Each structure stands twice: as C-alpha cells, then as structure tokens.
Image (cartoon, rainbow, N blue to C red):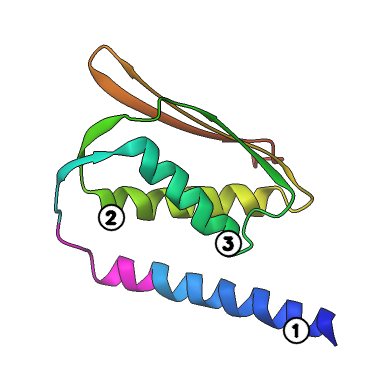
Amino acid sequence: SSMLLGVIRKEALHLNSLLNDFLLFVRPQKFNPDIFNLSEAVRGTVAAMEREGGLQNVEVEYSMPEELFVWGDEAQIRGALWNIIRNAGEAMPQGGLLQLCAAVKNGQTHLSVCDSGRGFS
C-alpha cells in the first residue's frame, strides 16, 4: 500500500542520513575556504531539504540580505546547515515555523536558525 511505501521511503532516507553523518564523522573533510554567498547557501540547503520531504508542513521565513558574502568552507557550512535544518524539521512533525536570520554585526556574520518545535530539556 502507499502508506507502507511512505514508511519505507522515510526509513530509507533516515538510514541514508545516519550513514552520511557517520562517514563525515570518521572521514573528516579537508578545510577548503573561499568566499561564497551565505544567503544562497542557506536558501539552497532549505530547498534541497524541502525536495527530500524533510520540512513537511513547515513554513520557512528568511530574514537576510539576498547577497551576504562570507569567507569559509561552503561545503562544510552547507553540511552543518543540513543537519540543523533536518533536526528542526524532525522537531516539528506536525509542521511549524522555521526562521533563518543572517546579518553582519561588528564586522562578524551571524546566522541563526530557529524553529517552533518543542525543544528538549
């Protein structure tokens, strides 16, 4: 049935995610910094998570400039964002609000990810 296929698909995605996390842990990537658009990386990561079905019934709100260039390892930043956003989606199984905010303060770029999930103690 379609319900069973949905459960299998969800579990397969979860196992794939666990395996990827494990591989990143045991095989750390080389730091490869460059200048990149953080806003574009954030929006692209959210779009990929939405395509994977990780943000069902979640409203996404952005508060960041269209272009916010930073220096760092874009792949590692995207990987960290993927994990944070995935956790936010899991914290809101019935849906909710995901807020992504980025700004420059005192010469430093600050990025915050907030969700309306229950949280934990």
Q: Which residue is found at the position 62% from the left and 59% from the top?
A: 54
C-alpha gap between disc 3 and disc 1: 17 Å
- In the picture, the disc for residue 75 is 2
Please say if 23 is above or below 71.
below
Please provide the residue range marked out in magenta. 22-30
Residue 95's x, y, as percent?
75, 47
Q: Secondary structure at mark 2?
A: helix
Query: Is residue 64 on the magenta stretch?
Result: no
Q: Left or right: where does residue 93 sit relative to residue 55?
A: right
Mark 3 highlights which residue?
51
Observer-nearest residue: 10 or 41?
A: 41
Q: How crowded is the residue under tag 2: few (<14 C-alpha within 10 Å), some, or many (20+)?
A: some
Q: Point out the residue furthest to the bottom here.
A: 1
- In the picture, the disc for residue 5 is 1
Q: Marks 3 and 1: which is nearer the front?
A: 3
Amino acid type, callout 3? Arg
Q: Marks 2 and 3: which is nearer the front?
A: 3
Please say if 48 is above or below 77.
below
